[in-house]
Image: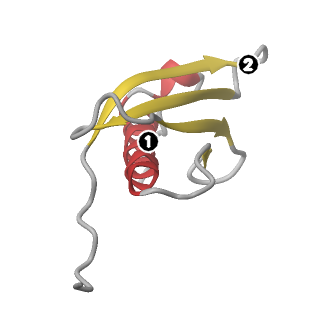
Amino acid sequence: MTNEPIAKRAVVLQLVSLTLAFDDARFFGAAIFTDANDPDGPWATVLIDHSDETPWFRLTTTDPSGSDVSEAAMAETDRLMRFILTEQPERIGRTRPTPPTS
């Protein structure tokens, strides 16, 4: 038996759904992933919720055991949300930040 670190699991995004709340300022949704090596295995679902402080979203896994697939799904969802908030914030009711004037 070895104590080698567990390699990061490869996950495949199956579905991402983001919805604006009635006030067009808050959003919520979910991202669903499967294990790239076992696509018929259990899915990892990450819930996405609006937050009033940086990084402007909150993630929650639905897997209480914290499996490797869930950890990889949380990391991928975090990366996805940071990309959306940086590159396409208007898609979830945000505006692009204006650069500071010198």
Image quadrant occupied by the N terminus: bottom left
Q: Measuring 66% from the left and 27% from the top, which residue is drawn there?
A: 27
Count of numbered badges drawn on the protein = 2
Q: Quadrant of residue 93?
A: top right
- Nearest the viewer among 53 and 38 is 38
Which numbered circle lies on residue 77? 1
Which residue is situated farthest in the front direction here? 1
Q: Residues within 10 Å of mark 1 (few under 14, many from 20)?
A: many
Which numbered circle lies on residue 21? 2
Distance in Å between CA atoms under marks 1 and 2: 20 Å
40 to 81, vertically: above or below: above
Q: Measuring 55% from the left and 23% from the top, which residue is drawn there?
A: 92
- Nearest the viewer among 24 and 30 is 30
Q: Measuring 39% from the left and 49% from the top, which residue is drawn there?
A: 69
Which residue is situated farthest in the right direction here? 22
- Residue type, numbered disc 2: Ala
Q: Measuring 40% from the left and 26% from the top, which residue is drawn there?
A: 88
93 to 48, vertically: above or below: above
Image quadrant occupied by the C terminus: bottom left
- The numbered mark, 1 or 2, whose residue comes first in the sequence reads 2
Question: Does the image show residue 4?
Answer: yes
Q: In the picture provided, is 4 more to the left or to the right than 22?
A: left
* Residue 44: image location, x then y, percent: 47, 39
- Residue type, numbered disc 1: Thr
Q: Disc 1 or disc 2, which is closer to the eye?
A: 1
Name the element at disc 2: loop
Name the element at disc 1: helix
- Nearest the viewer among 66 and 73 is 66
